[in-house]
Image: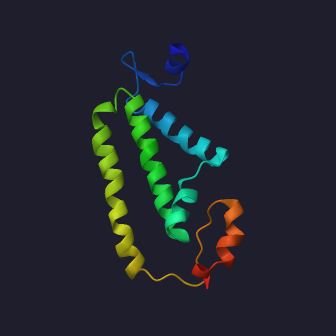
Amino acid sequence: MQALLENFGLVADGTVLPGFVFGIVHVSLVIIGFYSGWSINRFLKITSKGYISGIIGASLAHVIADLIASILDPSMRARTLGIVIGGLIPLLFIPILEKYITKSEDHIMIGDHEDIKKDLDGEHHR
């Protein structure tokens, strides 16, 4: 495996490039989530309606993927707290953006495919 990584230029000075493991784990978790149907959005729809759960769910899933990836990557482990806090702070802006950004009636956030029809027929779209 080491020789393969060296052939692709992913090893510098005998160690894997910093952040390489982070990138692989992070994107792999996102792909696994999409293909497995695992979704924070479904849980959030219990407590909120519409696209807000999609925005918050996608953001939280991203922060969770960042957390796991930074713990598993030795070169990023010391940065884990900063990565997670930095990922959570933008969530504080959602209420402000929701209050002051106007969306058209046709604006939808596409989430879980089985929920799309239900979302479009729901009260939040009318």
Is 59 drawn above or below residue 102 in the view shown? above
Q: Position of residue 67 (x, y in %)?
A: 40, 40
Nearest the viewer among 72 and 57 is 57
Work out whether 11 lies above or below 48.
above
Quarter holding residue 81: top left
- Between 65 and 24, the one nearer to me in the picture: 65
In the rendered image, the quadrant that contains the N terminus is top right
Can the viewer see residue 106?
no
Q: What sort of colour scheme is used for the picture?
A: rainbow
**Relative image position of residue 103 (x, y in whole percent):** 51, 81
Please state if 126 lies on the left or on the right of 19 as rendered. right
Q: Quadrant of the C terminus?
A: bottom right
Between 15 and 95, the residue placed more toward the observer is: 95
For residue 99, what is the image quadrant? bottom left
Residue 62 position, x and y percent, is 46, 49
The residue sitting at 69% across, 71% down in the picture is 118
The residue lying at 49 percent from left, 18 percent from top is 6
Considering every residue shown, the one lying at the far front of the view is: 46
**Residue at horizontal 34 percent and vertical 67 percent from the top:** 93
Residue 125 rendering spot, x and y as whole percentages: 61, 81
Can residue 64 be seen here? yes
